[in-house]
Amino acid sequence: MRRIRPITVFLVGLTAALTFSTGTALAAKGPFTFQNGGKPFFVQDPPNGKCLTMSQVARSPHNGADSPATVFSDKKCKGNATRIAPGHGGPKGLSFSSVRFG
């Protein structure tokens, strides 16, 4: 019978941990645009899995990124959620306070 060396188990575990922990840190490709205070803004290549909170209520979201976006009515990705598919805009009159991709 062949013995598995402890270093092999450690390296396999380390590789799996790095693979799974960096999966949510990958960025979506493309811009997410919105209006904030009447001015246009965008986030280029937003990070997947991270909640982005707006400084004030934002409007007119358009998801030009290649990953779905979910906008939330409240800060810290809380409240009513609206999912926006890649290449689409939010419903007319939609306002939001935070967004998460992925």
Image (tube, rainbow, N blue to C red):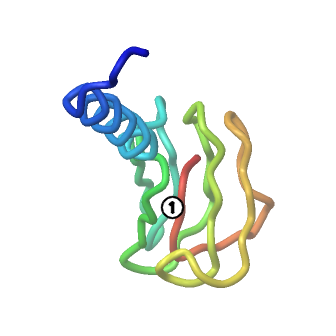
Q: Position of residue 35 (x, y in %)?
A: 51, 61
The amino acid on which the numbered mark 1 sits, given as a three-letter code, is Gln
Query: Which residue extends farthest top?
Result: 2
Rendering quarter of residue 86: top right
Name the residue located 53 percent from the left edge and 59 percent from the top edge.
Answer: 100
The image shows a total of numbered marks equal to 1
Q: Position of residue 71 (x, y in %)?
A: 62, 65
State the residue at coordinates (62%, 73%).
Answer: 72
Crowding at dot 1, Cα within 10 Å, few <14 / some 14-19 / many 20+, comes out as: some
Residues 93 and 68: in front is 68
The answer to which quarter of the image holds residue 14 is top left
Say above or below: 1 vs 64: above
Q: Quadrant of residue 87?
A: top right
Compared with 11, 24 (above or below) is below
40, 64: nearer the viewer? 64
Residue at the far right in the pictured view: 91
Q: Look at 61% across and 56% down and name the residue there.
A: 61
85 vs 69: above or below = above
Q: Which residue is mark 1?
A: 35
Where residue 12 appears, as percent x and y from the top left, is 34, 29
Residue sitting at x 47%, y 68%: 38
- The residue lying furthest to the front in this view is 1
* Position of the N terminus by quadrant: top left
Relative depth, front residue between 21 and 94: 21
Q: Position of residue 18 (x, y in %)?
A: 31, 38
Q: Secondary structure at mark 1?
A: strand
